[in-house]
Amino acid sequence: MATADVRGEVPDDEGVDPLTIGRRIRQLRTERGMTLDELAAAVDRAPSQLSMIENGRREPKLTLLQAIARALGSSIDAILESEPLDERATLEISLERAMRGQTFQALGIPPFRIGKTVPNEALKAMLALQGEIERLRDERAATPEEARRANVALRRLMRTQNNHFEELEQHAARILDAVDHPGGPLTQRTASDIAAHLGFTLHYVPDLPQTTRSVADIKNGRLYLSSRLAAKGDPRTAVLQALSSRILGHREPTSYAEFLRQRVETNYLTGALLIPEAHAVPFLQEAKKDRAISIEDLRDAYSVSYETAAHRFTNLATVHLGIPVHFLKVHESGTITKAYENDDVNFPTDRLGSIEGQMCCRRWTSRVVFDVDDHFNPYYQYTDTGNGTYWCTARVELSSEGAHSVSVGVRFDDTKWFLGRDTPNRGVSKHSVEVCCRRAPADLEASWRDHSWPNVRTPRTLLATLPTGAFPGVDTTDVYEFLEAHAPR
Protein backbone atom coordinates (compact mmCIF):
# COMPACT_ATOMS: atom_id res chain seq x y z
CA MET A 1 0.00 0.00 0.00
CA ALA A 2 1.40 3.40 -0.97
CA THR A 3 1.92 6.12 1.65
CA ALA A 4 3.11 9.72 1.58
CA ASP A 5 6.81 10.29 2.21
CA VAL A 6 8.42 12.39 4.96
CA ARG A 7 8.82 15.43 2.66
CA GLY A 8 5.06 15.87 2.49
CA GLU A 9 4.85 14.83 -1.18
CA VAL A 10 2.93 12.01 -2.76
CA PRO A 11 5.40 9.36 -4.05
CA ASP A 12 5.50 8.94 -7.80
CA ASP A 13 5.14 5.15 -7.77
CA GLU A 14 3.42 3.14 -10.45
CA GLY A 15 -0.30 3.06 -9.71
CA VAL A 16 -0.31 6.30 -7.65
CA ASP A 17 0.56 8.83 -10.34
CA PRO A 18 -1.42 12.09 -10.47
CA LEU A 19 -3.89 10.66 -12.98
CA THR A 20 -4.75 7.72 -10.76
CA ILE A 21 -4.95 9.84 -7.60
CA GLY A 22 -7.23 12.33 -9.34
CA ARG A 23 -9.56 9.66 -10.69
CA ARG A 24 -9.75 7.97 -7.30
CA ILE A 25 -10.71 11.28 -5.65
CA ARG A 26 -13.40 11.77 -8.29
CA GLN A 27 -14.64 8.22 -7.80
CA LEU A 28 -14.89 8.67 -4.01
CA ARG A 29 -16.58 12.05 -4.39
CA THR A 30 -19.14 10.68 -6.84
CA GLU A 31 -19.87 7.67 -4.62
CA ARG A 32 -20.65 10.05 -1.76
CA GLY A 33 -22.92 12.22 -3.91
CA MET A 34 -20.76 15.37 -3.55
CA THR A 35 -20.39 17.96 -6.28
CA LEU A 36 -17.02 19.46 -7.15
CA ASP A 37 -18.14 22.81 -5.67
CA GLU A 38 -19.13 21.12 -2.41
CA LEU A 39 -15.78 19.39 -2.05
CA ALA A 40 -13.93 22.59 -2.96
CA ALA A 41 -15.81 24.49 -0.26
CA ALA A 42 -15.07 21.76 2.29
CA VAL A 43 -11.30 22.00 1.73
CA ASP A 44 -11.27 25.78 1.15
CA ARG A 45 -9.97 25.58 -2.41
CA ALA A 46 -11.23 26.86 -5.74
CA PRO A 47 -13.28 24.35 -7.78
CA SER A 48 -10.92 24.92 -10.72
CA GLN A 49 -7.96 23.80 -8.59
CA LEU A 50 -9.71 20.58 -7.56
CA SER A 51 -10.77 20.00 -11.17
CA MET A 52 -7.10 20.09 -12.24
CA ILE A 53 -6.25 17.60 -9.47
CA GLU A 54 -9.06 15.25 -10.49
CA ASN A 55 -7.92 15.44 -14.13
CA GLY A 56 -4.34 14.60 -13.17
CA ARG A 57 -2.93 17.95 -14.26
CA ARG A 58 -1.77 18.92 -10.78
CA GLU A 59 -0.34 16.78 -7.99
CA PRO A 60 -1.82 17.59 -4.56
CA LYS A 61 0.42 18.31 -1.59
CA LEU A 62 0.11 16.08 1.45
CA THR A 63 -1.79 18.66 3.53
CA LEU A 64 -4.42 19.16 0.79
CA LEU A 65 -4.68 15.39 0.27
CA GLN A 66 -5.35 14.97 3.99
CA ALA A 67 -8.08 17.63 3.87
CA ILE A 68 -9.70 15.99 0.82
CA ALA A 69 -9.63 12.59 2.53
CA ARG A 70 -11.32 14.01 5.67
CA ALA A 71 -13.97 15.81 3.59
CA LEU A 72 -14.74 12.55 1.79
CA GLY A 73 -14.86 10.58 5.04
CA SER A 74 -11.94 8.51 3.85
CA SER A 75 -8.17 8.24 4.39
CA ILE A 76 -5.01 8.98 2.45
CA ASP A 77 -4.33 5.25 2.24
CA ALA A 78 -7.69 4.72 0.54
CA ILE A 79 -6.84 7.39 -2.03
CA LEU A 80 -3.34 6.02 -2.64
CA GLU A 81 -4.21 2.32 -2.55
CA SER A 82 -3.41 0.33 -5.67
CA GLU A 83 -6.83 -1.33 -5.93
CA PRO A 84 -8.30 -1.21 -9.46
CA LEU A 85 -10.50 1.72 -10.35
CA ASP A 86 -13.91 1.24 -11.93
CA GLU A 87 -14.08 0.67 -15.69
CA ARG A 88 -14.84 4.27 -16.58
CA ALA A 89 -11.96 5.69 -14.55
CA THR A 90 -9.58 3.08 -15.94
CA LEU A 91 -10.56 3.94 -19.51
CA GLU A 92 -10.18 7.67 -18.89
CA ILE A 93 -6.74 7.21 -17.35
CA SER A 94 -5.59 5.01 -20.24
CA LEU A 95 -6.78 7.55 -22.81
CA GLU A 96 -5.24 10.47 -20.89
CA ARG A 97 -1.89 8.66 -20.92
CA ALA A 98 -2.27 7.84 -24.59
CA MET A 99 -2.90 11.51 -25.40
CA ARG A 100 0.34 12.42 -23.65
CA GLY A 101 2.28 9.77 -25.55
CA GLN A 102 4.26 9.83 -28.78
CA THR A 103 1.53 8.40 -31.00
CA PHE A 104 -0.95 11.25 -30.45
CA GLN A 105 1.85 13.83 -30.64
CA ALA A 106 3.22 12.37 -33.88
CA LEU A 107 -0.25 12.53 -35.43
CA GLY A 108 -0.69 16.14 -34.32
CA ILE A 109 -3.76 15.33 -32.18
CA PRO A 110 -3.92 17.77 -29.24
CA PRO A 111 -5.13 16.47 -25.87
CA PHE A 112 -8.82 17.05 -25.25
CA ARG A 113 -11.15 16.93 -22.26
CA ILE A 114 -12.94 13.63 -21.79
CA GLY A 115 -16.49 14.68 -20.98
CA LYS A 116 -18.95 12.65 -18.96
CA THR A 117 -21.20 12.29 -22.02
CA VAL A 118 -18.52 10.46 -24.02
CA PRO A 119 -19.64 6.80 -23.91
CA ASN A 120 -17.31 4.03 -22.76
CA GLU A 121 -17.53 2.42 -26.21
CA ALA A 122 -16.02 5.55 -27.77
CA LEU A 123 -13.13 5.51 -25.29
CA LYS A 124 -12.52 1.81 -26.03
CA ALA A 125 -12.56 2.50 -29.76
CA MET A 126 -10.00 5.31 -29.44
CA LEU A 127 -7.74 3.14 -27.30
CA ALA A 128 -8.04 0.26 -29.77
CA LEU A 129 -7.10 2.55 -32.66
CA GLN A 130 -4.17 3.95 -30.71
CA GLY A 131 -2.98 0.42 -29.92
CA GLU A 132 -3.21 -0.64 -33.57
CA ILE A 133 -1.28 2.45 -34.69
CA GLU A 134 1.47 1.65 -32.19
CA ARG A 135 1.54 -1.98 -33.32
CA LEU A 136 1.95 -0.93 -36.95
CA ARG A 137 4.62 1.59 -35.99
CA ASP A 138 6.56 -1.06 -34.09
CA GLU A 139 6.08 -3.47 -36.97
CA ARG A 140 7.51 -1.01 -39.48
CA ALA A 141 10.40 -0.37 -37.11
CA ALA A 142 11.38 -4.03 -37.44
CA THR A 143 14.45 -3.26 -39.53
CA PRO A 144 17.00 -5.94 -40.39
CA GLU A 145 18.89 -4.80 -37.28
CA GLU A 146 15.85 -5.41 -35.08
CA ALA A 147 15.35 -8.78 -36.76
CA ARG A 148 18.95 -9.71 -35.97
CA ARG A 149 18.49 -8.65 -32.36
CA ALA A 150 15.40 -10.84 -32.05
CA ASN A 151 17.26 -13.72 -33.68
CA VAL A 152 20.26 -13.34 -31.36
CA ALA A 153 17.99 -13.37 -28.29
CA LEU A 154 16.30 -16.54 -29.52
CA ARG A 155 19.63 -18.25 -30.25
CA ARG A 156 20.79 -17.46 -26.72
CA LEU A 157 17.64 -19.05 -25.32
CA MET A 158 18.23 -22.14 -27.44
CA ARG A 159 21.81 -22.33 -26.24
CA THR A 160 20.88 -22.08 -22.54
CA GLN A 161 18.44 -24.98 -23.02
CA ASN A 162 20.85 -27.03 -25.15
CA ASN A 163 18.30 -26.60 -27.96
CA HIS A 164 15.94 -28.94 -26.11
CA PHE A 165 12.41 -27.77 -25.33
CA GLU A 166 10.70 -30.21 -22.99
CA GLU A 167 7.23 -28.70 -23.42
CA LEU A 168 7.39 -29.17 -27.19
CA GLU A 169 8.58 -32.76 -26.74
CA GLN A 170 5.56 -33.41 -24.53
CA HIS A 171 3.21 -31.90 -27.12
CA ALA A 172 4.64 -34.27 -29.74
CA ALA A 173 4.35 -37.29 -27.44
CA ARG A 174 0.68 -36.56 -26.65
CA ILE A 175 -0.25 -36.16 -30.32
CA LEU A 176 1.55 -39.37 -31.33
CA ASP A 177 -0.13 -41.26 -28.50
CA ALA A 178 -3.53 -39.91 -29.57
CA VAL A 179 -3.13 -41.41 -33.05
CA ASP A 180 -1.51 -44.64 -31.76
CA HIS A 181 1.78 -44.12 -33.57
CA PRO A 182 3.83 -47.26 -32.94
CA GLY A 183 7.24 -45.63 -33.44
CA GLY A 184 9.66 -45.50 -36.32
CA PRO A 185 9.04 -43.44 -39.46
CA LEU A 186 5.86 -41.39 -39.43
CA THR A 187 3.81 -42.32 -42.47
CA GLN A 188 1.73 -39.99 -44.63
CA ARG A 189 -1.35 -41.80 -43.31
CA THR A 190 -0.33 -40.98 -39.73
CA ALA A 191 0.16 -37.33 -40.70
CA SER A 192 -3.38 -37.42 -42.11
CA ASP A 193 -4.60 -39.05 -38.88
CA ILE A 194 -3.05 -36.19 -36.89
CA ALA A 195 -4.89 -33.70 -39.09
CA ALA A 196 -8.17 -35.56 -38.52
CA HIS A 197 -7.49 -35.71 -34.77
CA LEU A 198 -7.17 -31.91 -34.79
CA GLY A 199 -10.38 -31.53 -36.80
CA PHE A 200 -8.88 -30.80 -40.25
CA THR A 201 -9.28 -32.34 -43.68
CA LEU A 202 -6.44 -31.97 -46.19
CA HIS A 203 -6.97 -30.25 -49.54
CA TYR A 204 -4.25 -29.99 -52.19
CA VAL A 205 -4.89 -27.07 -54.56
CA PRO A 206 -3.00 -25.55 -57.51
CA ASP A 207 -3.74 -21.92 -56.59
CA LEU A 208 -2.37 -21.62 -53.05
CA PRO A 209 -1.30 -17.97 -52.47
CA GLN A 210 2.34 -17.60 -53.50
CA THR A 211 3.37 -16.01 -50.21
CA THR A 212 2.20 -19.01 -48.14
CA ARG A 213 3.23 -22.62 -47.54
CA SER A 214 -0.23 -23.58 -46.37
CA VAL A 215 -3.48 -21.94 -45.32
CA ALA A 216 -5.70 -23.20 -42.51
CA ASP A 217 -9.42 -22.51 -42.72
CA ILE A 218 -10.12 -22.75 -39.00
CA LYS A 219 -13.80 -21.99 -39.40
CA ASN A 220 -14.44 -24.95 -41.72
CA GLY A 221 -11.67 -27.28 -40.54
CA ARG A 222 -9.86 -27.37 -43.88
CA LEU A 223 -6.08 -27.30 -44.42
CA TYR A 224 -4.98 -26.18 -47.88
CA LEU A 225 -1.59 -27.16 -49.29
CA SER A 226 0.00 -26.73 -52.68
CA SER A 227 -0.51 -29.61 -55.09
CA ARG A 228 3.05 -28.98 -56.25
CA LEU A 229 4.36 -30.08 -52.84
CA ALA A 230 2.68 -33.44 -53.22
CA ALA A 231 4.77 -34.12 -56.31
CA LYS A 232 8.14 -33.17 -54.81
CA GLY A 233 9.79 -32.97 -51.41
CA ASP A 234 8.35 -34.47 -48.25
CA PRO A 235 4.56 -33.94 -48.10
CA ARG A 236 4.51 -34.89 -44.41
CA THR A 237 6.62 -31.89 -43.45
CA ALA A 238 4.25 -29.35 -45.00
CA VAL A 239 1.26 -30.95 -43.26
CA LEU A 240 2.95 -31.16 -39.86
CA GLN A 241 4.32 -27.61 -40.02
CA ALA A 242 0.83 -26.33 -40.76
CA LEU A 243 -0.70 -28.36 -37.94
CA SER A 244 2.00 -27.50 -35.39
CA SER A 245 0.75 -23.94 -34.99
CA ARG A 246 -2.71 -25.32 -34.19
CA ILE A 247 -1.28 -27.85 -31.72
CA LEU A 248 0.63 -25.08 -29.95
CA GLY A 249 -2.30 -22.66 -29.93
CA HIS A 250 -0.35 -19.89 -31.66
CA ARG A 251 -2.13 -16.58 -31.95
CA GLU A 252 -1.46 -13.79 -34.42
CA PRO A 253 2.06 -12.53 -33.59
CA THR A 254 2.33 -8.93 -32.41
CA SER A 255 6.07 -8.53 -33.06
CA TYR A 256 8.80 -9.94 -35.25
CA ALA A 257 10.36 -11.59 -32.20
CA GLU A 258 7.11 -13.43 -31.51
CA PHE A 259 6.79 -14.41 -35.17
CA LEU A 260 10.33 -15.78 -35.13
CA ARG A 261 9.74 -17.70 -31.89
CA GLN A 262 6.57 -19.24 -33.31
CA ARG A 263 8.43 -20.32 -36.45
CA VAL A 264 11.17 -21.99 -34.41
CA GLU A 265 8.57 -23.76 -32.25
CA THR A 266 6.71 -24.95 -35.35
CA ASN A 267 9.86 -26.39 -36.92
CA TYR A 268 10.90 -27.98 -33.63
CA LEU A 269 7.54 -29.67 -33.10
CA THR A 270 7.54 -30.91 -36.70
CA GLY A 271 10.93 -32.52 -36.12
CA ALA A 272 9.73 -34.03 -32.83
CA LEU A 273 6.76 -35.62 -34.61
CA LEU A 274 8.87 -36.98 -37.47
CA ILE A 275 11.63 -38.24 -35.15
CA PRO A 276 9.95 -38.97 -31.78
CA GLU A 277 12.15 -38.50 -28.74
CA ALA A 278 11.01 -41.75 -27.07
CA HIS A 279 12.15 -43.81 -30.06
CA ALA A 280 15.12 -41.78 -31.33
CA VAL A 281 16.97 -41.51 -28.01
CA PRO A 282 17.48 -45.28 -27.55
CA PHE A 283 18.51 -45.46 -31.22
CA LEU A 284 21.16 -42.76 -30.69
CA GLN A 285 22.29 -44.13 -27.33
CA GLU A 286 22.90 -47.52 -28.92
CA ALA A 287 24.84 -45.82 -31.72
CA LYS A 288 26.96 -43.97 -29.17
CA LYS A 289 27.62 -47.23 -27.33
CA ASP A 290 28.86 -48.70 -30.61
CA ARG A 291 30.83 -45.50 -31.39
CA ALA A 292 28.86 -45.28 -34.63
CA ILE A 293 26.69 -42.15 -34.48
CA SER A 294 25.75 -41.06 -37.99
CA ILE A 295 23.39 -38.31 -39.16
CA GLU A 296 22.82 -40.39 -42.30
CA ASP A 297 21.64 -43.34 -40.22
CA LEU A 298 19.22 -41.10 -38.31
CA ARG A 299 17.96 -39.72 -41.61
CA ASP A 300 17.42 -43.17 -43.10
CA ALA A 301 15.84 -44.63 -39.95
CA TYR A 302 13.06 -42.05 -39.97
CA SER A 303 12.83 -41.32 -43.71
CA VAL A 304 13.49 -37.58 -43.36
CA SER A 305 15.77 -35.10 -45.08
CA TYR A 306 19.37 -34.73 -43.97
CA GLU A 307 18.65 -31.22 -42.67
CA THR A 308 15.73 -32.47 -40.55
CA ALA A 309 17.91 -35.24 -39.11
CA ALA A 310 20.74 -32.79 -38.41
CA HIS A 311 18.37 -30.34 -36.68
CA ARG A 312 16.81 -33.08 -34.63
CA PHE A 313 20.21 -34.39 -33.57
CA THR A 314 21.02 -30.99 -32.04
CA ASN A 315 17.78 -31.24 -29.97
CA LEU A 316 18.78 -34.57 -28.47
CA ALA A 317 22.58 -34.76 -28.49
CA THR A 318 23.47 -32.69 -25.43
CA VAL A 319 20.52 -33.55 -23.17
CA HIS A 320 20.48 -37.30 -23.84
CA LEU A 321 23.98 -38.12 -25.08
CA GLY A 322 26.06 -35.52 -23.22
CA ILE A 323 27.56 -34.24 -26.47
CA PRO A 324 27.76 -30.48 -27.16
CA VAL A 325 27.29 -29.79 -30.88
CA HIS A 326 27.12 -27.15 -33.57
CA PHE A 327 25.00 -26.93 -36.70
CA LEU A 328 25.47 -24.84 -39.85
CA LYS A 329 23.48 -24.31 -43.02
CA VAL A 330 25.48 -22.38 -45.60
CA HIS A 331 24.39 -21.16 -49.03
CA GLU A 332 26.66 -21.86 -51.98
CA SER A 333 27.54 -18.14 -51.97
CA GLY A 334 29.19 -18.70 -48.58
CA THR A 335 26.48 -16.97 -46.53
CA ILE A 336 25.42 -18.62 -43.27
CA THR A 337 21.62 -18.99 -43.28
CA LYS A 338 21.11 -21.05 -40.10
CA ALA A 339 23.34 -21.75 -37.14
CA TYR A 340 23.37 -23.21 -33.65
CA GLU A 341 26.16 -24.05 -31.23
CA ASN A 342 26.73 -24.94 -27.62
CA ASP A 343 30.25 -26.33 -28.02
CA ASP A 344 32.05 -22.94 -28.03
CA VAL A 345 32.90 -23.11 -31.70
CA ASN A 346 33.94 -19.65 -32.87
CA PHE A 347 31.45 -18.71 -35.60
CA PRO A 348 31.75 -15.30 -37.26
CA THR A 349 29.26 -12.74 -35.92
CA ASP A 350 28.30 -9.14 -36.53
CA ARG A 351 28.48 -6.48 -33.81
CA LEU A 352 25.08 -7.60 -32.49
CA GLY A 353 26.23 -11.20 -32.14
CA SER A 354 24.21 -12.49 -35.09
CA ILE A 355 25.68 -15.44 -37.01
CA GLU A 356 23.10 -15.65 -39.80
CA GLY A 357 24.07 -13.47 -42.75
CA GLN A 358 27.81 -13.71 -42.08
CA MET A 359 30.28 -15.26 -44.50
CA CYS A 360 31.42 -18.73 -43.54
CA CYS A 361 35.16 -19.26 -43.58
CA ARG A 362 36.45 -20.80 -46.83
CA ARG A 363 38.48 -23.33 -44.85
CA TRP A 364 35.50 -24.59 -42.83
CA THR A 365 33.88 -27.92 -43.67
CA SER A 366 30.64 -26.17 -44.70
CA ARG A 367 32.46 -24.37 -47.55
CA VAL A 368 34.96 -27.04 -48.52
CA VAL A 369 32.19 -29.60 -49.13
CA PHE A 370 30.97 -27.61 -52.16
CA ASP A 371 34.23 -28.48 -53.94
CA VAL A 372 33.93 -32.21 -53.27
CA ASP A 373 32.86 -34.23 -56.31
CA ASP A 374 31.33 -37.11 -54.32
CA HIS A 375 27.91 -35.90 -53.13
CA PHE A 376 26.63 -39.41 -52.44
CA ASN A 377 28.78 -40.07 -49.39
CA PRO A 378 29.10 -37.70 -46.42
CA TYR A 379 32.15 -35.44 -46.24
CA TYR A 380 34.13 -35.40 -42.98
CA GLN A 381 36.83 -32.95 -41.92
CA TYR A 382 38.86 -31.92 -38.90
CA THR A 383 39.39 -28.17 -38.67
CA ASP A 384 41.91 -26.46 -36.40
CA THR A 385 40.58 -23.14 -35.04
CA GLY A 386 41.57 -20.59 -32.44
CA ASN A 387 39.21 -22.40 -30.05
CA GLY A 388 40.64 -25.84 -30.69
CA THR A 389 40.00 -28.62 -33.18
CA TYR A 390 36.50 -29.51 -34.38
CA TRP A 391 35.24 -32.41 -36.48
CA CYS A 392 32.33 -31.95 -38.86
CA THR A 393 30.20 -34.05 -41.17
CA ALA A 394 28.54 -32.23 -44.05
CA ARG A 395 26.32 -32.70 -47.08
CA VAL A 396 25.15 -30.55 -49.97
CA GLU A 397 21.42 -30.36 -50.67
CA LEU A 398 19.63 -28.57 -53.50
CA SER A 399 16.66 -26.23 -53.13
CA SER A 400 14.81 -23.61 -55.12
CA GLU A 401 17.22 -21.04 -53.67
CA GLY A 402 20.33 -22.91 -54.84
CA ALA A 403 22.67 -25.36 -53.18
CA HIS A 404 23.15 -25.40 -49.41
CA SER A 405 25.52 -27.33 -47.24
CA VAL A 406 24.27 -28.74 -43.96
CA SER A 407 26.84 -29.72 -41.36
CA VAL A 408 26.97 -31.00 -37.81
CA GLY A 409 30.13 -30.85 -35.76
CA VAL A 410 31.59 -31.60 -32.34
CA ARG A 411 34.74 -30.95 -30.36
CA PHE A 412 37.74 -33.18 -31.04
CA ASP A 413 37.24 -35.10 -27.78
CA ASP A 414 33.72 -36.14 -28.82
CA THR A 415 34.70 -37.37 -32.27
CA LYS A 416 35.22 -40.88 -30.85
CA TRP A 417 31.44 -41.45 -30.86
CA PHE A 418 30.96 -40.85 -34.60
CA LEU A 419 31.43 -42.68 -37.85
CA GLY A 420 33.90 -40.81 -40.06
CA ARG A 421 36.32 -39.99 -37.24
CA ASP A 422 39.14 -41.64 -39.22
CA THR A 423 38.94 -39.11 -42.07
CA PRO A 424 42.27 -37.81 -43.40
CA ASN A 425 40.73 -34.45 -44.35
CA ARG A 426 42.25 -31.53 -42.44
CA GLY A 427 41.75 -27.78 -42.49
CA VAL A 428 42.89 -24.68 -40.64
CA SER A 429 40.42 -21.86 -40.06
CA LYS A 430 41.43 -18.56 -38.51
CA HIS A 431 38.47 -16.47 -39.58
CA SER A 432 38.88 -14.33 -36.47
CA VAL A 433 42.08 -13.12 -38.15
CA GLU A 434 41.24 -11.01 -41.20
CA VAL A 435 43.88 -12.53 -43.47
CA CYS A 436 42.37 -16.01 -43.10
CA CYS A 437 39.87 -15.58 -45.93
CA ARG A 438 38.21 -12.19 -45.69
CA ARG A 439 41.18 -10.66 -47.52
CA ALA A 440 42.67 -12.03 -50.68
CA PRO A 441 46.21 -13.42 -50.68
CA ALA A 442 48.77 -10.60 -50.66
CA ASP A 443 50.06 -11.26 -54.18
CA LEU A 444 46.57 -11.23 -55.71
CA GLU A 445 45.60 -8.10 -53.81
CA ALA A 446 48.73 -6.32 -54.97
CA SER A 447 47.97 -7.19 -58.60
CA TRP A 448 44.27 -6.35 -58.67
CA ARG A 449 43.16 -4.06 -55.85
CA ASP A 450 43.64 -0.89 -57.88
CA HIS A 451 42.64 -2.46 -61.20
CA SER A 452 39.20 -3.94 -60.50
CA TRP A 453 35.71 -2.75 -59.67
CA PRO A 454 33.03 -5.39 -59.06
CA ASN A 455 29.37 -4.42 -59.40
CA VAL A 456 27.91 -5.61 -56.11
CA ARG A 457 24.74 -7.66 -56.14
CA THR A 458 23.09 -6.05 -53.11
CA PRO A 459 20.85 -8.36 -51.07
CA ARG A 460 17.21 -7.33 -51.41
CA THR A 461 16.72 -6.95 -47.66
CA LEU A 462 19.92 -5.03 -46.94
CA LEU A 463 18.31 -1.58 -46.91
CA ALA A 464 14.63 -2.44 -46.64
CA THR A 465 12.63 -2.88 -43.48
CA LEU A 466 10.92 -6.19 -42.96
CA PRO A 467 7.62 -6.71 -44.76
CA THR A 468 4.67 -5.38 -42.80
CA GLY A 469 1.82 -7.52 -41.54
CA ALA A 470 1.43 -9.83 -38.58
CA PHE A 471 2.94 -12.58 -40.76
CA PRO A 472 5.83 -10.82 -42.55
CA GLY A 473 5.65 -11.06 -46.32
CA VAL A 474 2.19 -12.67 -46.48
CA ASP A 475 -0.38 -10.93 -48.70
CA THR A 476 -3.49 -11.22 -46.51
CA THR A 477 -5.77 -10.06 -49.31
CA ASP A 478 -4.67 -13.04 -51.41
CA VAL A 479 -5.22 -15.35 -48.43
CA TYR A 480 -8.73 -14.07 -47.68
CA GLU A 481 -9.76 -14.14 -51.36
CA PHE A 482 -8.41 -17.70 -51.60
CA LEU A 483 -10.38 -18.83 -48.54
CA GLU A 484 -13.54 -17.16 -49.82
CA ALA A 485 -13.19 -18.94 -53.15
CA HIS A 486 -12.54 -22.38 -51.61
CA ALA A 487 -14.87 -22.31 -48.60
CA PRO A 488 -17.65 -24.91 -48.72
CA ARG A 489 -21.01 -23.44 -49.70
Image (cartoon, rainbow, N blue to C red):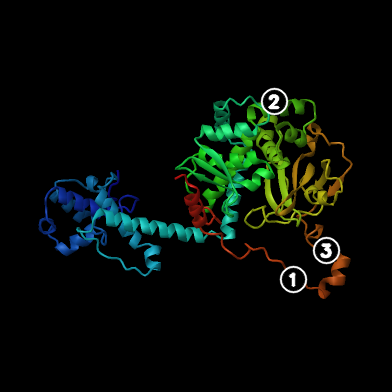
Nearer to the camera, 302 or 411: 302
What's the residue at 19%, 61% (across, down)? 51
Q: Secondary structure at mark 1?
A: loop
Query: Mark 3 near mark 2, Cβ–Cβ under 8 Å?
Result: no
Q: Are marks 3 and 1 in contact (CB under 8 Å)?
A: no
Q: Which residue is mark 2?
A: 282
Quadrant containing the N terminus in the rendered view: top left
Measured from the top left, where is residue 253 in percent x and y? 49, 49
Total marks placed: 3
* Quadrant for the C terminus in the image: top left
Comes first in the chain, label 3 or label 1: 3
Callout 3 amino acid:
Ala
Is 121 left, or right, of 288 in this rendering?
left
Residue 50 in the image: state x and y as whole percent: 18, 60
* On screen, residue 417 above or below 17: above
From the viewer's perspective, tell me whether residue 33 is left or right of residue 468.
left
The residue lying at 87 percent from left, 67 percent from top is 444
Look at label 2 and name its amino acid.
Pro
Which residue is label 1 attached to?
455
Query: 109 left or right of 271?
Result: left
User: Could you say which disc has been placed on residue 440 in the image?
Assistant: 3
Q: Earlier in the sequence, mark 3 or mark 2?
A: 2
The amino acid at mark 1 is Asn
